[in-house]
Image (cartoon, rainbow, N blue to C red):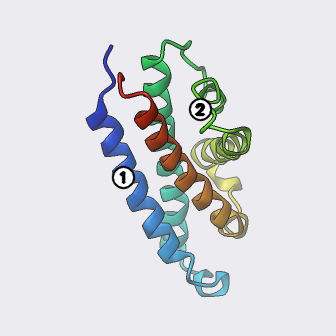
Amino acid sequence: MVLDHKLVSDHLRDLEQYVVTLRGERTKTLEELKGQLVIQQGIVHLVQNSVEAVANIAGHLIAECGLAAPSSYAESFRSLARLGSQFDSNLTESLVVMARFRNLAVHRYWLVDFAKVYGNLPQYLTSLERFASAVGRFLEQNPFL
């Protein structure tokens, strides 16, 4: 198998777009977003899409590097740590937390507390940006992929 650089690139581009959009929404106060259900749901959905983009990239890297296929998003993020130091434990654990949120948003959406999502958004955005940078460094250090 050969790493599909276009696939990784496409997911990274989408991830960047999600982060830029979410950063823009983060300039609004929680009070301004009260009663804005479409915007609230859009924010939740963009976080969910971000986690899925990260998981798709992680799964592709894991497969290309010959590691065992993970059984969950959280496991795929933990597997990244075996690929290199750029995927450090702080990044890994923050992605695991995001994977749990994604599962809640998808499977038990009625339990999502938007105020908590909004409060966690700065950490989510930092983790997403760190992941994108880590992938870039990993690919630079492994040009054979």
Q: Residue at x 37, y 44 (%)?
A: 11
Q: Position of residue 35 (x, y in %)?
A: 59, 81
Instruction: Look at the picture and state if 38 lies above or below 74.
Output: below
The type of residue carrying mark 1 is: Asp
Q: Secondary structure at mark 2?
A: helix
Circle number at residue 100: none
Residue at position x 48%, y 48% in the image: 132
Q: Nearer the viewer, residue 108 or 141?
A: 141
Q: Callout 1: 10 Å neighbours few (<14), some, many (20+)?
A: some
- Of residues 131 and 11, the one nearer the viewer is 131
Residue 100's x, y, as percent? 68, 42
- The residue shown at (59%, 32%) is 73
Task: Tell me the quarter of the image containing the N terminus.
Answer: top left
Residue 128: x %, y % from top left: 55, 53
Q: Which mark is residue 14?
A: 1
Give the residue at mark 2. 73
Q: Earlier in the sequence, mark 1 or mark 2?
A: 1
Say if mark 1 contacts mark 2, CB within 8 Å. Answer: no
Q: Position of residue 92 (x, y in %)?
A: 67, 39
Q: Secondary structure at mark 1?
A: helix
> Above or below — where is 1 with respect to 80?
above
Q: Residue at x 57, y 25 (%)?
A: 83
Kindly identify the amino acid type of the residue bearing the numbered disc 2.
Answer: Tyr
